[in-house]
Image (cartoon, grey):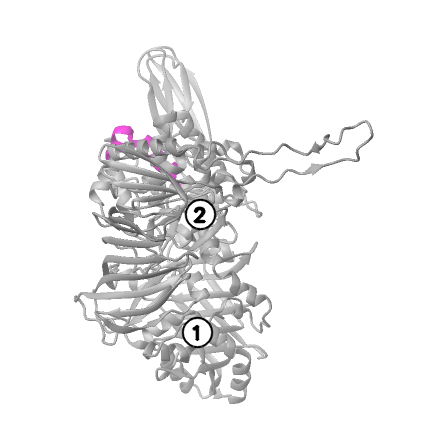
Amino acid sequence: MRFVDFHASNRKQNYSNNSEATLSMLRPGRKPLKTRFLSSGFWLLSPYFQILKGFQVRSPWLGLACLFPLLLSAGPAGDLAKALGELTFDRNQCYRVRDVTFSKEDIRIYLTEGHLVFSKPVAGRPIAALFSSDGEDGGDGEVILLPPDRAERKSLASFTHSPNLDDHFRTALFLFTGDEYAALQEQIAANPGNKKAPEIGALLDEQYDQVLRNIAVSYQSRLVLDLLGRPGRAIDLFASIFESPKLGTYDIVYDPDNIEQIIAGHVTNKNNRVFFDDWTSFTAASFRKKTPDARPELDASDFRIDATIHPDLSMTATTRIKVKPREPLRAARFNVSPAIKISAVTVDGHPAEVLQPESPRGSLISRGNNVFLVVPDQPLAAGREYEFEFQHQGNVILPAGDGVYYVTARGSWYPTYGLQFATFDLTFHYPRAYQLVAPGEIVEDHTEGDVRTTHRRTGSTIRMAAFNLGDFAQSRAQTGPYTVDVWANRKLEASLQPRMPMEVTPPIPARRRPTDVLSMRPVETPPDPTARLKTLATDVASALDFMASKFGPPALPHLSVSPIPGTFGQGFPGLIYLSTIAYLRNVPSSTGLPKSVDLFFQDVLYAHETAHQWWGNRVTADNYRDYWLMEALANYSALLYVEKIRGQRAADEMLESYRTALLAKNEAGETRESAGPIVLGQRLQNSTQPNAWTAITYGKGSWIIHMLRRRMGDERFFALLTGLVKKYDHNPITTEEFRQEAAKSLPPKSDDPNFEAFFSQWVYSTGIPSLKFTYTLKGIAPNIKLTGTLTQTGVDDDFSALTPIEIRFARGPAITKWIASGSDPQTFTVTLKQTPAKVALDPQNAVLKR
């Protein structure tokens, strides 16, 4: 399961503990039945795109602007937001330009010939400019962007067919809060050939004024943050949108707040799904020379939430948070679901201004929840603790039919700042007809009239607090000091209801009785959503006990499991969501899913989400490039449990299904695995490979962990996992730190002792080889020469996989030789004292291969 929350627009991408264990990784070529995050997060924008269908679009840039009403309040932020919404070009600030150049870190822009018009000032200075070469003889603009490493060049080439971006464009819009205006004006003034052209400025303003406003509003929160002033921090946002004959419309953004300051890509719509395809994303040149400060602007702790769920299932809530800025702040950024509206905020009891715009383009590029700003009446001082109180409301509980409900904003129904460990005190008031599930121990639970109140408090710090609501049945299981409560819907959601049978009554001949009716198929009995309630409680408790014995205590001692419509699961601290299908004895035919996926729903899904109590809720990922670790470790932990209760064959069956999904091809004949290295994270989910993120993160990720296990052996492998939880408890881990820890667990004198070659190939690159092994025997015992040849095909020439060759004998232990494959056949010779009974290539499935 997956939930993603970005710290403001920060590309650090503070992922939650958990990502979706989705079924699509088991079914190559099938679209997952659940609306996934890239569609589910963006699904909230669908009304906007419906508006666009009837809108007279004068420019392709309007295809992802912002037509939503803005939530503005009186104050400096509201004034700036209003100015952005009314922004126009200054017709008298239009120039006929030639050979004007400027750069922003790795971005180089050349305005060879055309017209450049600046916007009217906001906060005392222009913040935008438009370049157009349309209608100009020799008119041209050029942008050059050179990614600094091979992986990013390969990523860029997969979209643009070139490892470096060197594109000639007709039109470009620039937004900036740095010194671009002054630098451009200096160049314009230095060349006498650059002349004012107010008549062209009028034409450009008329043609592009709406584009300017829409794009400015799309970046509204980020622009306002800079325009308010930021003591001690660079004010230097640069967002550019280009239109070229070759590449169409695309974005290049530089934001010094992001952990990867430069992002290039484009927005596209495919099969009614909206994507931002990240062409490349990397650290800017000046930042590559210094150690980045990944600390957040502020620490958020001690969440106290009092929420009321009304009879119509709408929610109103008050959230109080203790906030300590790490640096002076004029405004503080927070995240919340687009379904939640912030109505009021106070800071230490004093009213603060709130700016909560809806910015589709900004949300697409950052792939996060909506960012809103809180502007106190006085700047926030570094190191001082403040009490923030938020009043908010919205509809995050949706009906799924027949008394079943779906909680949409499971980790963002209250204001957050990143995903920091904090204590949570949760009070819910809700209709007495329902049960409500949330993390923490019960402090108070009572009913007055038609309202039930439940008060819970976590005994240790967690990163987020989710909840679920419904008409539930309950079963409890105890395992040592841990309690597992499993809740099941009493009714079945509409999507799982049996379809009505088609009945055909033919003309009744005289000899046929009126009761003779031909039915096209028999009537199905509706599945029972409580069928596996007690079994599931026992199973989850068993998985929790197994993992606690390997990794130590879970995030919280009390684990609740609750149903959610769809084919996915999600594992929050102390609370798990499981697909309703996991509660049924069999996969219903109404889902269209094959019966062969029973293993996924019966054992893998709940074990995977249980494993997130450690991987993601105790140990966390440092940024989006490391997030695969949480999913891979959780999924492989589930396979370890499946292996324990069902045997090695069942675990191998799942690994085989992942291999199949990785090798599935898209319309262009490209395998899902080839979409990019696993460290690209959510960037793997794009318009050309919409299912690649799932297949690679879960499937290849599980294979990577499995291959590490085979290399180091079970004893060392389990010691590695135990050590990771102890060392990184309540702390993030990077992929490089994981490599270093794994290398310490290798047996002495191992090939590739630092795991550098392994990670370079399997983690930071792509490829699944076809391997073929042949051998000959010469001589007689005790001097038998075995000469083997390992041949590799189907991958790039620089691919190399360390592969085991097992030599077995009638008597005595087997010998395992690890051979590195390569572009040429690899030959080795070993002397044996007896004739081998069997020589086999990778008999224990230790290498991901075709």
Secondary structure type for disc 1:
helix
Where in the figure is residue 438, as x and y percent of width and height?
A: 31, 48
Where in the figure is residue 433, as x and y percent of width and height?
A: 39, 48
Question: What span is colored magenta in the figure?
Answer: 701-719
Q: Residue at x 19, y 71 (%)?
A: 381
Q: Residue at x 46, y 45 (%)?
A: 565
Decide which of 584, 208 is in the foreground and name it.
584
Decide which of 581, 305 is in the foreground and name it.
305
Where in the figure is residue 104, as x and y percent of width and height?
A: 37, 70
Relative placement, left or right, of 737 versus 125 is left
Secondary structure type for disc 2:
helix
* Residue holding disc 1: 216
Relative placement, left or right, of 80 versus 132 is left
In which quadrant of the rendered image does the N terminus lie? top left
Relative placement, left or right, of 237 versus 50 is left
Whether 616 is drawn above or below 705: the answer is: below
Structural crowding at the residue carrying mark 2, measured as other residues with C-alpha within 10 Å and reported as few (<14), some (14–19) or many (≥20):
many
Residue 599: image quadrant is top left
* Residue holding disc 2: 693
